[in-house]
Image: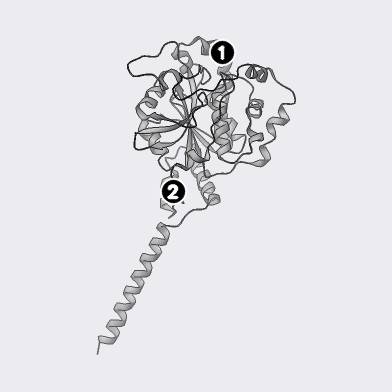
């Protein structure tokens, strides 16, 4: 009789199929560890610097990994609000918030420590990228302009920027040129549109330092802003799907987290002068403790930059206040 063997064969086939499905489910739900994710992100960053169009999300899926789910608004909750101390260090305050979210001890990333790592108080986005890299932080800088000389500061027509543009050009262009060989520094000529920026923050697993025109960010509807372009850095820490808005930490305001409509942020980024600059900072990484003391070693005495900053301390503001005069970003 064939009944017995046939039944055994059918049972065995079902068991094999069930086992295969169970293994597939395990692969689908296999959560990647922080160390494994760091390794994968470094590999992706190296490939992107060589010109390959690869993305971390695609590589995770290809290798059968999933990210451990984060609680709602985890990036926002993990990022303390910090105020800028002068009219030029909004970018430093954004870097400080990003470093604190990655568990860098506060004394190691104070504004004084960050200023000590800079050679100028004329802060460009490239300076911020190298500042993050000096702590061992991997990030990606996306911009539509890979040079300083003919860049947005000139197009914006602002006297504030024009006064230092010539002196800054050689220094910033040298930073761009070094990026290909500098560990932890990834700079790409790429305009990140509104939808791409939204999607970059969708999984609540990275922060974005964004250059905007400060006049436009809180401009009242129907009232065009006055004056020249005011470059200003803010930190995006998440999304508010219910209002189609970004969650923003603005170092020029006292709000813990502001909610800025996606359309308004897009308008503030689209002004000539911003170069569409965005720095993406993944939260699934750890800084290098060996690099914490570099700023202290380089700054044994109070610099002129610090004295200037100490004299320009901002006052606290509420959500209904006009934004502070912010003319610090490039």
Q: Which mark is residue 164?
A: 1
Question: In the displayed structure, would residue 56 be above or below residue 26?
Answer: above
Counting from the top left corner in percent of width and height, residue 159 is at 50, 9
Q: Residue at 31% across / 78% down in the picture? A: 11
- As drawn, the residue found furthest toward the bottom would be 1
Counting from the top left corner in percent of width and height, residue 92 is at 57, 27
Relative to 105, is 37 on the left or the right?
left
Quadrant where the N terminus is found in the figure: bottom left
Q: Quadrant of residue 63?
A: bottom left
Question: In the displayed structure, would residue 123 be above or below residue 196?
Answer: above
Q: Which residue is mark 2?
A: 59
The answer to whether residue 7 of the structure is visible from this angle is: yes
Counting from the top left corner in percent of width and height, residue 317 is at 51, 22
Q: Residue 34 versus residue 260: which sits nearer the camera?
A: 260
Distance from Cα at disc 1 to Cα at disc 2: 43 Å
The answer to whether residue 273 of the structure is visible from this angle is: no
Question: In the displayed structure, would residue 37 be above or below residue 170?
Answer: below
First in sequence: mark 1 vs mark 2: 2
> Counting other residues with Cα less than 10 Å from the Cα at mark 2, is it few (<14), some (14-19), or many (20 or more)?
some
User: Element type at marker 1?
Assistant: helix
Q: Residue 4 versus residue 194: which sits nearer the camera?
A: 194
């Amino acid at each position: 009789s064939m009944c017995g063997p046939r039944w055994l064969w059918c049972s065995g086939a079902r068991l094999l199929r069930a086992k295969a499905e169970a293994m597939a489910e395990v692969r689908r739900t296999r959560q990647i560890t922080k160390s494994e994710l760091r390794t994968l992100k470094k590999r992706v960053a190296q490939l992107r610097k060589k010109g390959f169009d690869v993305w971390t999300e695609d590589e995770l899926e290809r290798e059968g990994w999933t990210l451990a789910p984060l609680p709602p608004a985890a990036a926002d909750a993990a990022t303390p609000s910090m105020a800028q101390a002068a009219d030029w260090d909004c970018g430093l305050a954004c870097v400080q918030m990003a470093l604190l979210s990655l568990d860098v001890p506060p004394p190691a990333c104070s504004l004084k420590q960050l200023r000590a790592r800079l050679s100028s108080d004329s802060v460009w986005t490239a300076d911020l990228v190298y500042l993050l890299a000096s702590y061992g932080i991997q990030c990606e800088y996306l911009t539509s302009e890979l040079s300083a000389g003919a860049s947005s500061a000139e197009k914006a027509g602002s006297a504030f920027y024009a006064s230092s543009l010539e002196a800054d050009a050689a220094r910033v262009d040298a930073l761009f040129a070094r990026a290909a060989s500098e560990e932890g520094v990834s700079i790409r000529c790429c305009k990140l549109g509104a939808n791409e920026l939204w999607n970059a923050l969708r999984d609540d697993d990275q922060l974005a330092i964004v250059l905007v025109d400060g006049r436009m960010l809180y401009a009242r509807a129907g009232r065009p802003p006055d004056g020249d372009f005011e470059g200003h850095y803010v930190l995006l820490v998440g999304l508010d799907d219910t209002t189609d808005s970004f969650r923003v930490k603005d170092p020029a305001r006292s709000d813990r987290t502001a909610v800025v409509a996606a359309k308004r942020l897009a308008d503030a980024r689209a002004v000539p002068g911003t170069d569409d600059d965005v720095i993406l900072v993944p939260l699934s990484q750890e800084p290098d403790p060996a690099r914490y003391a570099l700023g202290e070693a380089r700054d044994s005495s109070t610099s002129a930059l610090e004295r200037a900053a100490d004299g320009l301390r901002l006052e606290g503001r509420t959500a209904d206040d006009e934004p502070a005069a912010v003319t610090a970003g490039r």
